[in-house]
Image (cartoon, grey):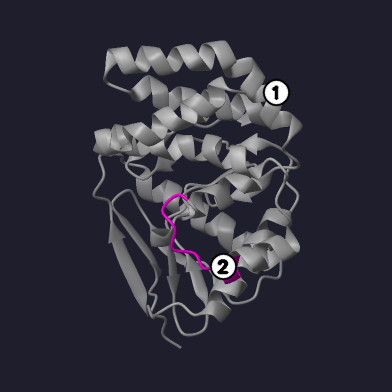
């Protein structure tokens, strides 16, 4: 049986972008299989090079509540798989920006340094970079300790889980374009709420398998700050107010 393939070309300035994407897809595919997830799929990688990635072609169709429900349950099952550490063994990419990684046993400090600190360091406006850096310097130890106190075992994260990185055909939902690493499962869930697009059935199904922590609301602000900073660095000022709001939340810890 012939399998339809989609060819994706590297239109970034990073020579290993497709290699990182392929590794993330393979890790997610393995997790789907290991967790026994039904009706959630990940494109198979047929070939990859620095310039071209060949993966499963998806015959896209409209999402249904049933498929959103399966996606929520499936994501929770993936998040239930035990992992030994946080971070990742190599740097990869979050959208069109580098995503700094390293392996660690300390989630709070990993997120502080490799997520928030790295993005703040990329800000071109020196005054704003200094302002945000000062908050992280003053509150960093408190933030890291707070995250460690309110976070359980690490999980494999999709890492860039907004609605544009989920597709549907008639039978399944598909996870695409990952920015994988290991960390707090609620970081994935937080990003699904950043731009919306996920139905209530998705969240009900997820929480039936993995109930949210009591501190999820504040964690969501902190985790999405990473993505707001990334979007600010990529696209500019429209995301600045969201960054400032989240830094205010950190200052109030």
Picture quadrant where residue 98 is located: top left
Vertical arrangement, residue 185 with respect to residue 221, above or below: below
- Nearer to us in this view, 23 or 41: 41
N-terminal-most mark, 1 or 2? 1
Q: Is residue 71 visible?
A: no
Residue 62 included in the magenta stretch of the image: no
- Residue, disc 1: 145
Work out which residue is located at the far bottom of the displayed protein and give it: 1
Q: Residue at x 58, y 55 (%)?
A: 27
- Residue, disc 2: 200
Distance from the alpha carbon under mark 1 to that under mark 2: 32 Å
- Nearer to us in this view, 151 or 237: 237
Vertical arrangement, residue 240 with respect to residue 76, above or below: above
Q: Which residue is drawn at 32% across and 23% down?
A: 123
Q: Residue 220 at what x, y percent from top left?
A: 56, 42
Vertical arrangement, residue 10 with respect to residue 122, above or below: below
Q: Is mark 2 on a helix, strand or loop?
A: helix
Q: Where is the C terminus found, in terms of image quarters?
A: top right
Looking at the rendering, the stretch of residues picked out in magenta corresponds to 194-202
- Left or right of 173 in this view: 4: left
Q: Magenta span: helix, strand or loop, mainly?
A: loop
Q: What element carries label 1?
A: helix
């Amino acid at each position: 049986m012939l399998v339809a393939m989609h060819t994706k070309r590297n239109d970034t300035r990073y020579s290993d972008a497709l290699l990182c994407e392929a590794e993330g897809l393979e890790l997610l595919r393995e997790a789907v299989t290991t967790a026994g997830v039904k009706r959630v799929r990940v494109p198979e990688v047929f070939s990859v090079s620095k310039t071209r990635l060949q993966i499963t072609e998806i015959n896209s169709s409209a999402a249904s509540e049933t498929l959103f429900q399966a996606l929520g349950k499936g994501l929770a099952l993936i998040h239930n798989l035990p992992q030994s550490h946080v971070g990742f063994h190599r740097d990869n990419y979050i959208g069109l920006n580098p995503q700094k990684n390293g392996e660690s046993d300390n989630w709070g400090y990993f997120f502080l340094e490799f997520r928030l600190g790295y993005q703040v360091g990329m800000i071109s406006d020196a005054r704003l970079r200094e302002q945000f850096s000062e908050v992280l310097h003053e509150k960093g130890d408190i933030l890291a300790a707070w995250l460690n106190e309110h976070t359980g075992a690490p999980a494999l994260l999709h890492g860039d889980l907004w609605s544009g990185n989920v597709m549907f055909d008639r039978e399944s939902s598909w996870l695409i374009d990952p920015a994988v690493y290991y960390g707090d499962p609620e970081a994935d869930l937080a990003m699904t709420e950043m731009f919306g697009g996920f139905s209530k059935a998705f969240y009900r199904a997820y929480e039936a398998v993995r109930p949210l922590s009591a501190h999820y609301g504040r964690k969501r602000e902190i985790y999405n700050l990473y993505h707001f900073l990334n979007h600010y660095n990529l696209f500019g000022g429209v995301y600045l107010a969201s960054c400032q709001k989240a830094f205010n939340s950190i200052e109030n810890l």
